[in-house]
Image (tube, helix red, strand yellow):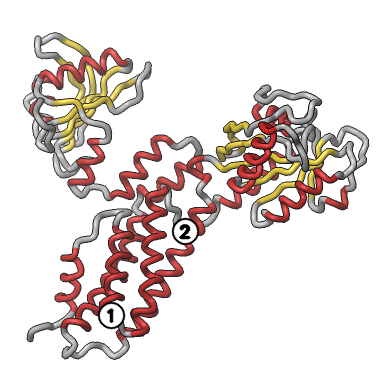
Amino acid sequence: MSEYTLDDTIVAIATASGIGSISIVRVSGEKALEIALKISKKDSLKPRFATLSYLHNTNDELIDEALIIYFKAPFSFTGEDIVEFQCHGGIAIANLVVDTVLDFGARMANAGEFSKRAFLNNKIDLSKAEAISKIIEAKSSDAVKLLARQLKGELKDFVEDIREDLLFMLAYTEVSIDYAEEDLPTDIFEKINQKIENITIKLSNTLDASRRREGMLSGFKVAIIGKPNVGKSSLLNKLLNYDRAIISDIAGTTRDTIEESVKIGTHIIKIVDTAGIRENTSDVIEQIGIEKSIQAINEADIVVALFDNSKICDDEDEKILNLLNDNSDKNIIKVLNKSDLENSFDKSRIIDFIEISTKDNINLLIKKVEKILDENTQEDELTLVSKRQIKSVENCLENINLSKNPLHSGELEFFAHFITEALYEISNITRPYENDEMLDVMFGEFCLGK
């Protein structure tokens, strides 16, 4: 089998499988137009115009009537000639078109190859390629809006601003090291210090915002906690509108965490029903479940703590209250459940709570959760959308912080090393850093060797 190359013309079905009104078959490469003309029996195709045409296979048999749109290089998604066949919906017709394109000399595209070619041809950067991948999988309008900002180039602009400042610092530092006899601006190191502080603030704010809003893509985690038989599983079933969890009066029925997704407002949330937390249990399996419950609290964006209105506040409730105090930095909703029964719980123990009955109506809780989620998705800060992006920013920030002492002590070689590492890290988000960029700044800004 011959090796795949970028000179190959590739083809793939661009729409999801199944029955629909249209299916789109996309062809990219130097033979795309030639193949389209053979299939349509047209002499030419006007770029960016939809042309209605009959499609024929290599045996000259009619296979469909479809719209053909030709995108001439470099004005296309991949930067190459692209032809799209918008044929009638259904996998059979789309496969016939693909088979015909293959017969005329194309090959099947590999996974992600259209986007890869767009990146290699400088039509998109890595941040946009990542946003394209994730927006296809997005399950909520929050995620779509967030990813659309990256498609527009918000992250690219952020990275370019950081790169520009780092290149400025690196260029002036290299000149100070290699051309010490040259006259440099007297305030240059004051400017470098200021840029370092500005970058530190920008990167730190971006990391904080990204961690707060991580659930926008994968779903915000909501952990339901409480002592046994307080109504956690009943609440989960009510939220899902079906019996997902087993309900009984026997303490310890829920042994493991149960995780399900549901939509509240415009938000996708992952609800985690935890095992009942109590002081002492001799059951090893139940103890493991309790430990996983505590882990779920640590990982949750919102904690819903249930208390039983019909029972007195006991030691197990106190354990829950202590856990809430230990996690006071989280969004916590205290809920007094079983409000339809006679009150025995000391309400003064849980200030700022809501009362519900999982047997009746839980709209008050749903509105409370939705309000918190709305507040967490209305920030204007830039948000990173993948662990790869977060790691790159963390590493960049770490190197920026490491560069401060060498700068202040005059160890410019070490300072330049850390700034270079920071450049490589931040550049991983969009496009790799090349040393020639620093040289361009260095020799473009200074009259060296005059």
Answer with left or right where residue 443 lies relative to residue 276. left
Secondary element under disc 1, as helix, strand or loop, is helix
In the rendered image, which residue does mark 2 sit on? 207
Residue at 30%, 65% (x, y): give it: 421
Mark nearest the camera among 2 and 1 is 1
Binning the other alpha carbons within 10 Å of mark 1 as few (below 14), some (14 to 19) or many (20 upward) gives some
Amino acid type assigned to the residue bearing label 1 in the image: Leu
From this view, report whether residue 414 is shown above or below residue 120. below
Residue at 23%, 36% (x, y): give it: 114
The circle drawn on residue 121 is: none
From this view, report whether residue 162 is shown above or below residue 346. below
From this view, report whether residue 190 is shown above or below residue 26. below
Q: In which quadrant of the rendered view does residue 179 lie?
A: bottom left
Q: Is residue 338 visible?
A: yes
Residue 311 versus residue 187: which sits nearer the camera? 311
Answer with left or right where residue 189 lies relative to residue 177. right
Q: Quadrant of the N terminus?
A: top left
Q: Is residue 169 visible?
A: no
In the rendered image, which residue does mark 1 sit on? 412
Residue at 9%, 36% (x, y): give it: 7
Residue at 87%, 33% (x, y): give it: 340
Q: Quadrant of the C terminus?
A: bottom left
Residue 413 position in % (x across, y down): 26, 77
